Image (cartoon, grey):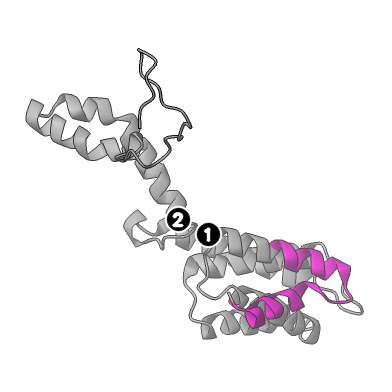
Amino acid sequence: MNAKEIKDLESYFKTENEHWNGHAFEMICEVLQKGNFENPETPLKLFSKSIGIFTEHYQTPLKAVQLFEAETDKQKIDTVQKLFVFEKVLNYVKYSEFEKADTDKIKDLLKSQTERLKDEVNKQPEYNKPLIGNIRDTLKGLMQKELEQLPETLKDLEPVQRLNVLCKLIPYVLPKVEAVHSEKGEPETENKTSISGWQLD
């Protein structure tokens, strides 16, 4: 992430509205931790746009929510990402007061849409669900399970195969042995003497 991208992200939680800043910062942290968006600014843009839409169209709540959903569609995000954004927006609207705007109906509609998206995500087959979160953590978890089962796995192998696997694993367990030459690390003594007391050259 370059300096400009960092500055752009920081601009979302460095406003005059502390309540907004708290929600935006929490959202940024979660997006960066999960790695569930290729561009971390995408959900923040949608989050920001949603508030503008709701304050402008609060008298027509259905239209407001439809306009917001249309904005999410423009970003070409998948259902899981869409659900994430809707949950964050709902959470913000639920615990915020808007000047001269009654958002109760918008909250109810957002809640309905969020539940619909949850149902859609839950109906997706496991293989069809996008991989979210840190891939490295997923692989580490997988490797941990495999290592725990290693004794059982090795037991079923032929002795030669078992030895071959162990030889390949040794470098990851034992430190590499390096040859030490006589000129390395051997202190020089001023007077080298033999057992009989004669001085050696």
Residue visible at 88% across and 73% down in the picture: 17
- Circle 2 — which element? helix
- In front of the other: 166 or 187: 187
Query: In x, y percent, where is residue 125?
Result: 35, 57
Question: Circle 1: is it few (<14), some (14-19), or many (20+) Cα within 10 Å?
Answer: some
- In front of the other: 30 or 73: 30
Residue visible at 32% across and 57% down in the picture: 127
- Circle 1 — which element? helix
- In front of the other: 167 or 77: 167
18 is within the stretch colored magenta: yes
Q: Are marks 2 and 1 in contact (CB under 8 Å)?
A: yes
Question: Circle 2: is it few (<14), some (14-19), or many (20+) Cα within 10 Å?
Answer: few
Provide the residue span drawn in magenta. Answer: 2-26
**Left or right: 180 in relation to 167:** right
**Where's the N terminus, which quadrant?**
bottom right
Query: In x, y percent, where is residue 145?
Result: 36, 36
- In front of the other: 113 or 124: 124
- The residue most toward the front is 198
Is residue 95 among what the camera can see? yes
Vertical relation: 181 (above or below) 16: above
**Left or right: 25 in relation to 133:** right
Residue position marked by numbered label 1 in the rendering: 118
Quarter occupied by residue 28: bottom right
Residue position marked by numbered label 2 in the rendering: 122
193 is within the stretch colored magenta: no
**Where's the C terminus, which quadrant?**
top left
The amino acid beneath tag 1 is Lys
**Left or right: 164 in relation to 103:** left
Query: In x, y percent, where is residue 54?
Result: 75, 80
